[in-house]
Image (cartoon, rainbow, N blue to C red):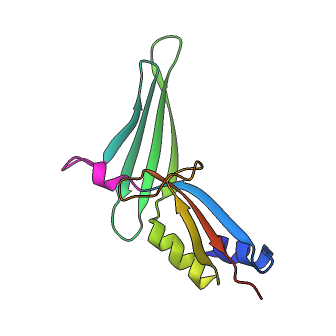
């Protein structure tokens, strides 16, 4: 919420705030599992773990890279996942309205199957 309020404070009337982010992949979770692989090669494995699927909405991005000795090193990054509608609400509270939402920077249409979105909110003219 504070991010949107801060952005709105820095915009002139008619200015825009843009975010590119993923859509939570919860629909891809197999029953009984908490993680989804998003990349798999001989030298790299990427997994999104959805640690808390309730009110906290916590996920962890796990990255495994193969080392020269054949073992893997792990890097993790915690996230609070967020739905596009939740971002729209934060923008509205900060005084902005959704102007565009695309699946990607090429302005392909955003659908219910889109894994990413580029969203543009606008501060109204004075």
Coordinates of residue 16 in the picture (x, y in percent): 71, 69
Q: Nearer the viewer, residue 109 or 36?
A: 109
Question: As drawn, which residue projects farthest toward the left?
Answer: 31
**Which residue is located at x 29 percent, y 48 percent?**
28
Instruction: Locate residue 17 relative to residue 23 in the image: left or right.
Output: right
Q: Is residue 4 above or below residue 67?
A: below
Q: Nearer the viewer, residue 58 or 121?
A: 121
> What range of the chain is rendered magenta?
24-34
Is residue 42 magenta-colored?
Answer: no
Return the x and y of residue 71 as percentages of the image width and height: 45, 18
Residue ID at (65%, 62%): 18
Q: Pick the quarter of the image with the C terminus.
A: bottom right
Q: Report the residue at 72% width, 74% height from top.
A: 6
Instruction: Indicate the position of residue 38 as horizontal and vertical percent values.
Output: 40, 38
Dominant secondary structure, magenta: loop
Residue 27 lies in the magenta stretch? yes
Q: Nearer the viewer, residue 69 or 1?
A: 1
**Residue 78: x %, y % from top left:** 50, 51
């Amino acid at each position: 919420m504070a991010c949107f309020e801060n952005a709105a404070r820095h915009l002139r009337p008619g200015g825009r705030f843009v975010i590119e982010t993923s859509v939570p992949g919860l629909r891809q979770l197999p029953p009984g599992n908490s993680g989804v692989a998003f990349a798999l090669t001989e030298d790299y494995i990427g997994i999104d773990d959805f640690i808390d699927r309730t009110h906290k909405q916590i996920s962890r991005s796990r990255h495994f890279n193969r080392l020269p000795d054949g073992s893997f090193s792990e890097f993790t990054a915690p996230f609070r996942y967020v739905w596009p509608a939740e971002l729209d609400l934060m923008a509205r509270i900060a005084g902005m309205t959704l102007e565009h939402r695309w699946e990607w920077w090429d302005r392909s249409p955003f659908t219910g199957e889109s894994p990413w979105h580029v969203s543009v909110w606008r501060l109204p003219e004075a």
